[in-house]
Image (cartoon, rainbow, N blue to C red):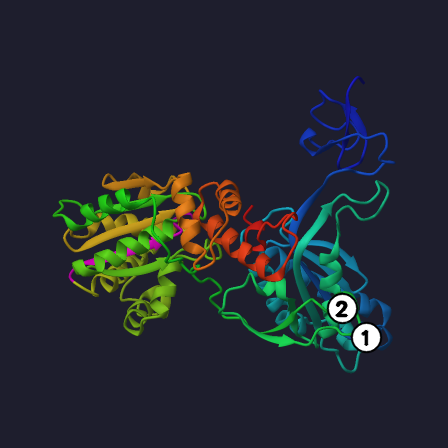
Amino acid sequence: MTESARCRSCGSEFAEAARYCSQCGARVDDRLPSDPNSGGARLFCERRQLTVMFVDLVGSTKLSFDLDPEDFTSAVSAYRDVCVRVVRHWRGYVSRYVGDGVLICFGYPHASEDDALRAVAAAWELARDIPEVSLSKSTAARSSTLPRLRARVSLHTGLAVVGDVVGRDSAESHDILGAAPNIAARLQALAGPGEVVISEATAALLPPTIQLRPLEPISHRPEMAAVGAFAVTHMPIGLIRRRPISLGTFVGRNALLESILLELGTEREQVPAILVCGEPGVGKSRLVHEIITKNAARSIKWIEVACSAYGLMSPLHPFKTWLDESDAEDEAISSTPEASGDAPDGPTSPFDRRRQTFGKLQASLLAHAPNVGLLVEDLHWADSTTLEFLAELVSATEPSRFALLMTSRDQLSHPVSILQQLRVETLGRLLPGDSAELARELSGGKSLSAFELAEIVGHADGIPLYIEEFVRAISQYRSAAIDPNRDHIPVTLRDSL
């Protein structure tokens, strides 16, 4: 073989032109370059920001003495099954089992922009689901008192190397190396049974709706003295909150803003439906904030809802959140057949129930004012029922009474996109001059040097969110006297990058 590669699954060599491994049948997409100096090690590994979770079963040693070995095995197996189910639901990855402990990571192999939030949500759910684990009937028959399983959960966010970092003949296929898993494991010393403890780095990435209690550092370990720790005391049911909008100088979008305001303020024959598309962090929320703020003087009552990555399988998910915040609307929607469970007179089909629900929700929206505007953010996460409702709402509403404003990361193929009156505006990145102006505004009273300004503009690449985070990071580095030659990508951006 003139040129060869190694299969990631079995480590066997195969020809470069091969489409499948001749030993295990894996696709060539799963191959790895061979390295004669690797000593048989698989070389596929990545440097990632991970939120690492460590779950430990409380009192496992005593439990192993109290139970028959087979019963103890069944208990540990049931506990692990709960861990796998919950972690997979929140898009985490079980790296390995360490005795009765479980090492889990969020951010690998698939990264999300909110991995820290997903990890803490999974940890909170695990701390409450593990005590509900029921042992088998045979175990119950042999044991006079069934133990109530409890776990300690700890998390830390940081950089690590993850992947095939072990030898080919090792039983571990994916490992995590670096300080992150060690810190996550050490933090368990601060966790009580059924408690979730997180590091300060993880806490910095969470929304303020999650309540935390500061803990004393681990004093007997010098390497942990600088690691701040918090116990999670309350996790709200609605995890999602809108990212705080930076209200600094509005730059580079004035022409588009005036154009949209003109369309919303003129007499019209069709309901104005405007979709603002753009990549994450480019300023879609900032633009719509300017639109609804300036339109407030034009007697438009704006109703704001947001789709969520956690509500893709929940019909009308953004409107459920809105209705929960309004007693009148909540009462209206709860009277629908789907919500109350009361069957109307005569047989009804699913289509009839859907039409009744759409009709009541439409009436609730339009009851607010003579001229109503509906803002729907993050349409790329909308469930199919929400998309159908928006399309019907635009088609069935009087143009003089209603306006629809939406944001999305891309122009998806869905019922809303085929509306004839839909106006799609793509929001691009800021020009270098506008980026510099925004950076200077965000720095406040702390002036930026020419070098710092050039670095921010160059690294942020015209994305306002990146500009904001880099300016904040520079301010923190100044106060902490950190070596400016180090890699200082803000921790808030690493998951997105």
Q: Which residue is mark 1?
A: 63
Q: Label 1 sits on what residue type?
A: Leu
Rendered position, 93 above or below 233: above
Residue in the foreground of this view, choosing between 424 and 329:
424
Residue at 79% in and 65% down = 100
Residue in the foreground of this view, choosing between 9 and 410:
410
Q: Secondary structure at mark 2?
A: helix
Coordinates of residue 465 in the picture (x, y in percent): 46, 50
Coordinates of residue 230 in the picture (x, y in percent): 63, 72
Rendered position, 262 above or below 444: above
Which circle marks residue 497 in the picture? none
Residue at 71% in and 65% down = 55
Residue 274 belongs to the span the image colors magenta: no
Give the Cα separation between the discs numbered 2 and 1: 9 Å
Residue in the foreground of this view, choosing between 436 and 219:
436
Q: State yes or no: discs 2 and 1 in contact (Cβ < 8 Å).
A: yes
Neighbours of disc 2 within 10 Å: few (<14), some (14-19), many (20+): many
Q: Label 2 sits on what residue type?
A: Ala
Labels 2 and 1: the sequence-earlier one? 1
Residue at 45% in and 47% down = 280
Coordinates of residue 319 in the picture (x, y in percent): 35, 61
**Side (left or right) of 290 relative to 219:** left
User: Which quadrant is the C terminus positioned in?
Assistant: top right
Q: Secondary structure at mark 1?
A: helix
Q: Which residue is mark 2?
A: 75
**Side (left or right) of 52 relative to 398:** right
Q: What span is in magenta?
A: 370-380
Residue 377 belongs to the span the image colors magenta: yes
* Quadrant in the rendering for residue 69: bottom right
**Does the image show residue 335?**
yes
Neighbours of disc 1 within 10 Å: few (<14), some (14-19), many (20+): some
